[in-house]
Amino acid sequence: MTINELVADGKDFDGVYFCKSNENGTEGWSLTFLNLERKQDRKFEEHEIGIKYQIMLHDESDKVEIFEAVLGDPRSYLKNMIDCNQQGMLMKKCKRSQKIFSKILGKKEFRNFQRLFDAP
């Protein structure tokens, strides 16, 4: 799937991790989409123009920047970050999102976080 197909897709997601990938000798991007399954985790901070996201950006040296923003179109934001060669994670702000970010940052293993979403 190309990034333009992703933007046009329209499927909802609670979070996405995006990083450069070099699978089979072909450079590209790896995207891991996250959906929180527990009902109590799906209480998001909604605003008139969109939902508040927690955003983590990191570079090749794993220097990290974290901030929050209300995104009206998270797919376009994701496309812009990829177009700017930026790696990171977007996640709808909820009770569990801060805990997930803390675990990821504590481990410093940005590409090995998927199991955090499987926790009960």
Image (spheres, rainbow, N blue to C red):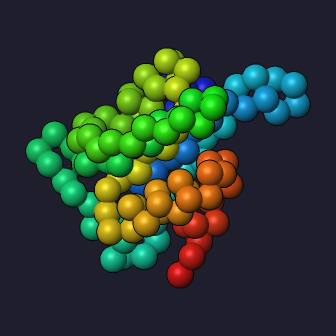
Residue shown at the point (40%, 61%) measured from the top left:
97
Residue shown at the point (41%, 51%) measured from the top left:
91
Query: Is 27 drawn above or below residue 12 in the view shown?
Result: above
Query: Is 120 drawn above or below residue 42 in the view shown?
Result: below
Q: Position of residue 96 (x, y in %)?
A: 39, 68
Residue shown at the point (44%, 42%) measured from the top left:
56
Residue shown at the point (42%, 76%) measured from the top left:
38
Q: Position of residue 75 (x, y in %)?
A: 41, 34
Task: Name the one closer to the observer, 7 or 46.
Answer: 46
Q: Report the side of 40 relative to 26 (left or right).
A: left
Query: Is 2 drawn above or below residue 15 in the view shown?
Result: above
Q: Report the side of 95 relative to 60 (left or right).
A: left
Tell me if residue 12 can be seen.
no
Looking at the image, the residue that sits furthest to the right is: 24
Task: Name the one closer to the observer, 22 or 12.
Answer: 22
Tell me if residue 115 can be seen.
yes
In the rendered view of the protein, which quadrant contains the N terminus? top right
Q: Report the side of 7 relative to 85 (left or right).
A: left
Tally of numbered discs? 0
Q: Position of residue 25 (x, y in %)?
A: 87, 25
Q: Position of residue 15 (x, y in %)?
A: 46, 51
